[in-house]
Image (cartoon, grey):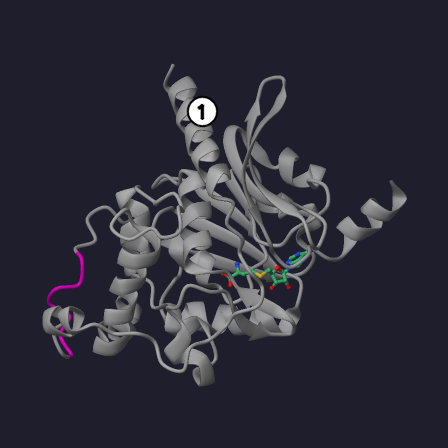
Amino acid sequence: MKHAMRWLSLILIAVALAACQRRDSAAPSIPETPVTRAADAATSPVGSLADLPTSSTLVHVPQASLKALGDPQFRRFRMMMVREQISSDGARDGREPIRDPRVLEAMRMVPRHEFVQSSIRRYAYIDQPLEIGYGQTISQPYIVALMTELLQPKAEDRILEIGTGSGYQAAVLALLVKEVYTIEIVEPLAKRAEETLRRLGYDNVHVMAGDGYRGWPDKAPFDGVIVTAAPERIPQPLVDQLKKGGWMVIPVGSRFSQELLVLRKVDKGVERVTVIPVRFVPMVGEVQKEEKKK
Ligand code: SAH
């Protein structure tokens, strides 16, 4: 019954999202300086950690990330990001707001600016994906929040992510679940993400360089799987490594036309809901050989 209710609420979210037809555009248009408002300046303590949100609903917030979280300017941008792009206060152009308070709190408690190169740090909280090198991007904040909410993370979960990129999505999940296992095919990106995550104290994230197509068999099964690069078909090994009752969130499609899907593993196979059209970088490696064969 509980599962039926969850599934129903997921379908309702999917219908609402489909109505607004947003895309995670790959081409960021970057304003010269991020917009600030007087009201934000007035409510932001300068150099104080005192009114960071309490983290009672989060699994843990790494001590090492607190300094970066306390930076007053980025803190202001981060609160604005959640308020104006993600939560029900400001969801724009018909986008379905993210309501899960744990997800909103996690988005407030990860210093996104630490996951992009210093030259574009001041743009880290804008409503766009951003370049992270090697032709890859860090997803738009709203898409990170949406995928996290759709995964329905719980404190005891062990999650597999394919496509570490900057490590930002993994860091958001790290505040909400027990362990995150993440695989990145571009070795220098895997290395950089691992360094960033270590420096900021996300000790429950485990990074592996390699092709994520075959998942991480030694650590399987997982309570949830999140894929942040788009294959043309769902890789079967990832379904195999998902626990029964577990959720997978994955963009599927060609380079120009993809849908974000939510799957749930059930006794008789897999149930699926299409959520929203998206545009992610393609999943490369073994999955492309599979695609050519078909
Ligand atoms: N989650 C990331 C954004 C991901 S961009 C973040 O928070 O920053 C997608 C990433 O998937 C890219 O870094 C790309 O190199 C990686 N990728 C593509 N194919 C892959 C594969 N087969 N296995 C693992 N990673 C892959």
Residue 272 vs residue 168: left or right? right
Residue 213 vs residue 171: left or right? right
Asked whether 58 falls inside the magenta stretch, the response is no
Residue 152: name its quadrant. top left
Which residue is at a point 70% across and 55% down the rendered structure image? 255
Q: Is residue 133 visible?
A: yes
Residue 96: name its quadrant. top left
Q: Where does residue 223 sit, x and y in percent of width and height? A: 48, 37
Q: Is residue 199 visible?
A: no
- Mark 1: which secondary structure? helix
Which residues are drawn in magenta? 47-53
Q: Is mark 1 within 8 Å of ligand 1?
A: no
Residue 42 vs residue 276: left or right? left
Question: How would you rate the neighbour count of disc 1 (Cα within 10 Å): few for under 14, some for 14-19, many for 20 or more?
Answer: some
Which residue is farthest front? 93
Asked whether 48 falls inside the magenta stretch, the response is yes
Q: Where does residue 129 sit, x and y in percent of width and height? A: 50, 65
Query: For this rendering, which residue is in front, 46 or 90?
Result: 90
Query: For this rendering, which residue is in front, 83 or 252?
Result: 83
For label 1, the residue is 7
Which residue is farthest top? 1
The C terminus is located in which quarter?
A: top right
Which residue is at a point 34% across and 45% down the rendered structure image? 97
Dominant secondary structure (helix, strand or loop) of the stretch shown in magenta: loop
The N terminus is located in which quarter?
A: top left
